[in-house]
Amino acid sequence: MKTMAAILRDPYPVHWDRASNERLGLGGRVINQGPLNLGYVANMLMAWAGDAAVRRLTVSFGPPVLDGDHVTARGVVTGVVDGIAHCDVWLERDGAPVVRGTAEVVAPAG
């Protein structure tokens, strides 16, 4: 995560400084960057519908994802209008959402 903090130009130490996080009560674990969590959801949508299919993706971030956590991106189509699939999407850890949102995706054929 330290590398991603540098790439994202995110100097906030919770993403790379284990000692600081220990003092904050996080048990020495670092927090995954929000854009990476968003990326997991975007990648799930693109794997389903194709790289250019995502038209809109809006999310809200919940509890932080810490190093060592296992997360899964999921989604469900709530409707299709004029070839656009409207979806509820989320990233979950241990069955509980840590990111929630909606997406509009060009519905894949078939």
Image: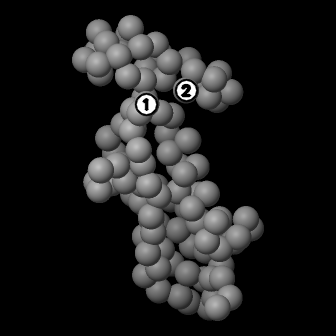
Tell me residue 73's x, y (percent): 47, 58
Tell me the kind of residue under disc 1. Answer: Asp
* Camera-side residue of 94 and 6: 94
Q: Is residue 18 above or below residue 48?
A: above
Whether tag 2 and tag 1 are in contact, CB under 8 A, the answer is: yes
Tell me residue 62's x, y (percent): 34, 45
Residue at screen point 25% across, 17% down = 25
Residue at screen point 38% across, 8% down = 19
Q: Tell me, what colour scheme is on the image?
A: one colour
Q: Is residue 18 above or below residue 35?
A: above
Q: Which mark is residue 1?
A: 2
Tell me the kind of residue under disc 2. Answer: Met
Q: Earlier in the sequence, mark 2 or mark 1?
A: 2
Residue at screen point 57% across, 73% down = 104
Q: Could you tell me which quadrant the N terminus lies in?
A: top right
Specify whether 106 is left or right of 31. right
* Camera-side residue of 8 and 18: 18
Q: Which mark is residue 88?
A: none
Q: From the image, tell me which residue sits under label 1.
A: 67
- Residue 37 seen from this side: yes
Q: Is residue 65 above or below residue 96?
A: above
- Residue 61 seen from this side: no
